Structure formats: C-alpha cells, structure tokens
C-alpha cells in the first residue's frame, strides 16, 4: 500500500497550492499570507496559461446536482470505496494502483475544500465549503449545439489528478483484464 504515499503527496500539494492562491491567516502561528484577490487573473505563459482564482460551490466545471451535503457525502463514500478497492487489488499491477491513488488524492483534496473550508475561512458550517480553482488554460474554440468553449474550465491540482487517474485507470484496467484473460486461456489448455 505504498502507493498511498502518492495520494498523500497529491493531497498536500493540492492543499498547499490552494492556500497559496486563496491565502491563509493563522495569527497564533504568525502566518499571514494574503493570497490573490477573488477573480484576479495573472498570465503565466501569455494568455495560454493563467493563474485565475475562483471558487466552485458545485462539482466539476460548476455543475450543481443535489445539495451542499451531497458532494461531501459522495466524496467520503467514493474515497472509502477507493481505499477498499485499493486494498483488494494491492497485489495487482502498479499502473492500476497508481491510477486509483491519483483519483483518491484528487477526491480527498476537493473533499477537504467542500467539507472544511467554510469553517476554516469562516463563511459557513461544515459541508458548505467551495472548491478553490486556479489553473486557467486556453483551449481551441469549440461550437457544439450552440455552446461555445474557448477556454478550458478553471481547475486545480485535485481535478488534474482525478482526470489523469481516470485516463490511466482506463488504460491499465483494460491491460489487467487482457492479462487475466490470457491467464485463463493458458490454464484452459
């Protein structure tokens, strides 16, 4: 289960980057980092890559299904399921375990925002937090069914981790299934 160190690394990296963007003040420890003003955008690589501070009260890309508690509870349940599944597949190929660790790290990173940020930053009760997003990438223009997309929706380290994890999961799960099928075919002969 050493793959969980990757999960831990993602959660820490995600939270540190979010706190650098949002800012944090802990007077007791003498920490006061102002962060960025909400909605502010700073070019990193011209207009292609910008650091843009926004917060997302919904799920991915701002979709809002269900209430505030819904996303927190789903995040908790998904994280528990992934941990159990990681334990079950602990002796399988590394690629499958890596993909699950990436997804878990992203899920936990955004879960922390949703559940605790409202209390930490003093704007609500538990489960009423908003996810901090800041990576703003230019995207080629797409027009589909009257919907226009010219920039990718602003995202964070956790979102990127989940996306990469899902892509790897599709690749490595298929490879694991093929290997299992080959083993069954060899055993049958």
Image (cartoon, rainbow, N blue to C red):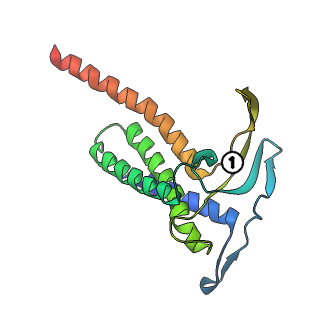
Q: Residue 119 sits in which quadrant?
A: bottom right
Q: Residue furthest top?
A: 189
Q: Residue at x 27, y 45 (%)?
A: 88
The C terminus, quarter of image? top left
Dot 1 alpha-carbon crowd within 10 angstroms: few under 14, some 14 to 19, many 20 or more:
many
Q: Which residue is mark 1?
A: 154
Q: Is residue 137 left or right of residue 176?
A: right
Q: Residue 61 sits in which quadrant?
A: top right
176, 123: nearer the viewer: 123
145, 76: nearer the viewer: 145
Position of residue 53 measured from the top left corner of the image (x, y, whole percent): 72, 57
Q: Residue at x 57, y 62 (%)?
A: 15
Position of residue 101 measured from the top left corner of the image (x, y, whole percent): 43, 48
Q: Residue at x 68, y 44 (%)?
A: 153
52, 87: nearer the viewer: 52
Residue 15 visible (yes or no): yes
Position of residue 155 measured from the top left corner of the image (x, y, whole percent): 64, 49
Residue 185 drawn above or below residue 143: above
Residue 173 drawn above or below residue 19: above
Residue 18 drawn above or below residue 28: above
Residue 9 visible (yes or no): no
Q: Is residue 186 left or right of residue 112?
A: left
Q: Is residue 4 left or right of residue 32?
A: left
Q: Residue at x 35, y 37 (%)?
A: 93
Q: Residue 145 sits in which quadrant?
A: top right
Residue 186 drawn above or below residue 101: above
Position of residue 166 measured from the top left corner of the image (x, y, whole percent): 48, 38
Q: Residue furthest right?
A: 46
Report the label total: 1
């Amino acid at each position: 289960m050493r793959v969980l160190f990757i999960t831990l690394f993602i959660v820490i990296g995600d939270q540190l980057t979010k706190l650098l963007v949002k800012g944090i003040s802990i007077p007791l420890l003498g920490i006061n980092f102002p962060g960025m003003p909400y909605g502010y955008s700073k070019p990193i690589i011209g207009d292609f890559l910008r650091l843009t501070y926004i917060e997302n009260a919904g799920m991915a890309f701002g979709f809002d299904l269900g209430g505030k508690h819904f996303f927190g509870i789903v995040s908790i349940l998904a994280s528990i399921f992934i941990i159990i599944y990681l334990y079950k597949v602990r002796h399988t190929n590394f690629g499958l375990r890596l993909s699950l660790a990436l997804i878990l790290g992203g899920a936990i990173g955004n879960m922390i925002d949703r559940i605790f940020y409202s209390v930490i930053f003093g704007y609500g009760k538990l489960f009423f937090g908003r996810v901090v997003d800041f990576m703003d990438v230019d995207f080629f223009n797409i027009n589909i069914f009257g919907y226009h997309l010219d920039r990718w929706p602003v995202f964070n380290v956790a979102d990127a981790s989940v996306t990469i994890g899902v892509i790897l999961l599709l690749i490595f799960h298929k490879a694991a299934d093929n290997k299992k099928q080959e083993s069954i075919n060899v055993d049958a002969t």
